């Protein structure tokens, strides 16, 4: 059974490892520790029978939430972990009276775009050259609560 919980210090090395595997410009150990201490940013992990398989970093501002990182261990993808993490953010956003959830995704990341679209996100904009290594445009996606 999948369980989403608040990340703890013991999770940081695994989060950083997953960031390095999944992203060309990953979050650092220092940034993850600062997110854990923050009152604004949140880091959740998802585990299956005690094994952490993914994480999500997000924050709230008045009226909306934004997901800044969502990663699932490559061999555990397409098993519902990412979906559960996104639904968790949506539920937390509702609890915080948010009206929208935003995220940005590489234009070429068809698997992620498909996941977000299936949940109910839709494209509301595009940012030229948002990503590096390689340079690529990013799509801005929105979920209306």
Image: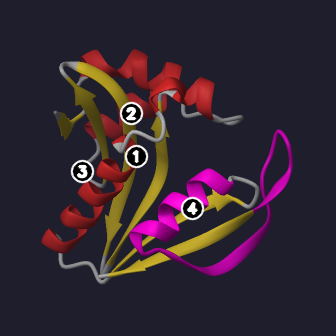
Question: Is residue 120 magenta-colored?
Answer: yes
- Residue 29 appears in the rendering: no
| Whether label 2 touches label 1, CB < 8 Å | yes
The residue at which mark 1 appears reads as 82
Could you give the CA–CA distance between mark 3 and mark 2, rounded to whole angstroms?
22 Å
Residue under label 2: 54
The secondary structure type at the circle numbered 2 is strand
The span shown in magenta is 110-137
Residue 138 in the image: above or below residue 122: above
What separation in Å lies between label 4 and label 3 (alpha carbons)? 31 Å
Q: Residues within 10 Å of mark 1 (few under 14, many from 20)?
A: many
User: Which numbered disc, 4 or 3, marks the residue that appears first in the sequence?
Assistant: 3
Q: Are marks 4 and 1 in contact (CB under 8 Å)?
A: no
Residue on which disc 3 sits: 39
Q: Nearer the viewer, mark 4 or mark 2?
A: 4
* Distance between mark 1 and mark 3 Cα atoms: 24 Å
How many marks can you see?
Answer: 4
């Amino acid at each position: 059974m999948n369980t989403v919980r608040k990340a703890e210090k013991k999770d940081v090395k695994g989060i950083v490892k997953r960031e390095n595997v999944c992203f060309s410009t990953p979050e650092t150990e220092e940034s993850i520790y600062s997110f854990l201490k923050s009152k604004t940013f949140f880091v959740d992990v998802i585990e299956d029978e005690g094994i952490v398989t993914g994480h999500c970093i997000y924050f709230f501002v008045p009226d909306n939430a934004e997901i800044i990182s969502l990663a699932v261990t490559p061999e555990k993808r397409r098993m519902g972990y990412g979906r559960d993490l996104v639904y968790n953010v949506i539920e937390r956003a509702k609890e915080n009276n948010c009206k929208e959830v935003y995220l940005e995704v590489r234009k070429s990341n068809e698997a992620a775009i498909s996941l977000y679209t299936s949940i109910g996100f839709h494209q509301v904009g595009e940012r030229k050259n948002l990503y590096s290594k390689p340079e690529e445009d990013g799509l801005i996606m929105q979920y209306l609560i």
